[in-house]
Amino acid sequence: MKKYLVLIVLFCVFMPVMTLAKNKIVISVLYFQNTIKSKDVDWLSKGLADMLISDLSASDDLTLVERENLQKVIDEQHFAQSGFADNNQAIKLGKVLNAEKIVTGSYIVSGNDLRIDIKIIDTSTAEIKSATASGYLKDLISIEKRMLIAAFKMLDVTYPENVTIDTNSYFAVQNFYQGVDLLDQGLIQQALEKFEKSEQFDPLYNKPQLEKEKAFTFLKNFKKARYYRELSVLFKEANEIIKRMEQKPFLQYMDVYNNSNWGNMTELERTEFNKKYQYHLLYTSPMHCAMGLQQKFMEIISKREEMLDDEWDTEEEKLDAIKSDIDAKKHDESRIISDKRSKLDEKYHEDREKIMEIQDYDERDVKLKPIDEKYKADKKTINDELGKLNEYYEKKADAAEKAIDDFDIRREQAEADLDKKNRILYDKIISIADNAEKSPVNDQFYESVLYYRLLSLRLVKDYDKLRIYCESFMKNFPEARMMWAVEDMYEEALKKSE
């Protein structure tokens, strides 16, 4: 696979980003109240708050208190979540968080219907503004966006252009926030199961990666936490490329630069400007975005496979070490018993030889009898000891073999599950090329976009399509830089599709 996974590393250096800009409104979004107290929809309490935090953060005019900081203050100050509906309690919590505005509210789920009531409280004047959004529960994502629009109006802040949808899957969101609640309770394994389910519903949903990192940090599995941290970065970058690709009109960096007030900006403002428009510099055309997205999907696939191999190779090494340890201990203890038996034999033969020197047959027989009997008894004891030892270690070895067999089954299942997740990304890579081919443009990245389709078809072993597309590629791009790889893939496709 590494032979074909040629990744182009793009890089741009920006000044360090400072955390706060002047005149930003500091806002804290509190957990929403579950009005009817239905446990089935408890996850919406933190879910609605976290979704709003993510979306409000897109505004350059606001600074959001992170949900983790809110949870920390709640735990430390012993605020009751039920008190969030009380305006005075909400203001009190807001002041602890140094927030100028508090966003709070409640929700009601009745059958398939959802209603959200939101209010924004000024912590200094106690002024309250409110709004309502409602619809079908399964349309939660669009309802939250309507609630967001209302929030920006109440804050008298312009709706930012870079608000995006993390996922369109209601079930991905549901499982994710159920996992968040479990993680806050310290139920880490159950939380991880929910995050995994969330990812199954939407393999490109970035938030589960971040929470998995936290979960494995709690478990002190820092290597796995690092993998999920790296994955979350790749997911975020992929989603940024998608945003850039979908921009209408597709502006270049110089377009936004020329329309900016760059000359009058402070260094901090210029840093934030460059951060905001860095993808305008990195990706200069829709086709460039298409290739960049394909590359990012390939990096995600490669990182997932690296993580799985590392995890399972480590476990396999442990199981092999256990089996080797059993064999070594059995060998050492068996040798001790064998040595004991050898010494018994040696002593018996020495004693017997001395008695055999006695000339009187009767006396000799009298003295030999107890020696023979003791030798037989001692030897039986040693043989029984050796038999028990062999039986004990045979059970240990059988258990180790069973553990290895179970491991092989679990690894095979894990690899099959990963193949399913990765297949979704491979299909997206292929789809990107299919769409590009429908309206080809004279773009330097077009050839690479089609190459990534070949690579994906080979990796999913669709050799019939691979053969057809290789032939087309070799005819249309005879001078392609990666022609050697395409030729190799074509020969493989010819063999495998026969």
Image (spheres, helix red, strand yellow):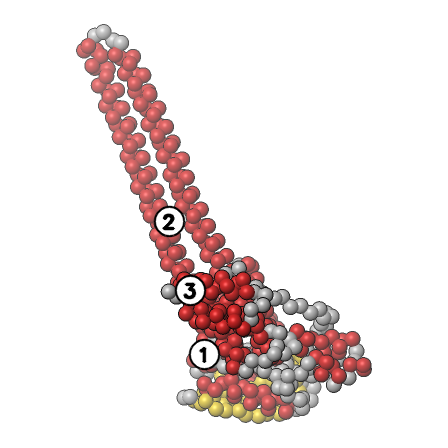
Q: Earlier in the sequence, mark 2 or mark 1?
A: 1
| Closer to the camera in the image, 236 or 65 | 236
- Secondary structure beneath dot 2 equals helix
- Residue at the left extreme, as displayed: 362
| Residue type highlighted by circle 2 | Ala
- Pointer 2: what residue? 400
Residue 171 got which mark? 1
Using the image, tell me which numbered label, if any, was put on residue 494.
3
Q: CA distance from mark 2 to mark 3?
A: 44 Å
Q: Residues within 10 Å of mark 1 (few under 14, many from 20)?
A: some
| SS at mark 1 in the image | helix
Observer able to see residue 360? yes
**Front: mark 1 or 3:** 3
Q: Write down the quadrant of residue 211 in the picture.
A: bottom right
Which residue is depicted at the point 41% across and 59% down?
A: 411
In the rendered image, the vertical position of residue 229 relative to residue 310, given as above or below: below
Residue 113 drawn above or below residue 382 = below
Write down the quadrant of residue 152 in the picture.
bottom right
Residue 482, position as x, y percentages in the image = 56, 65
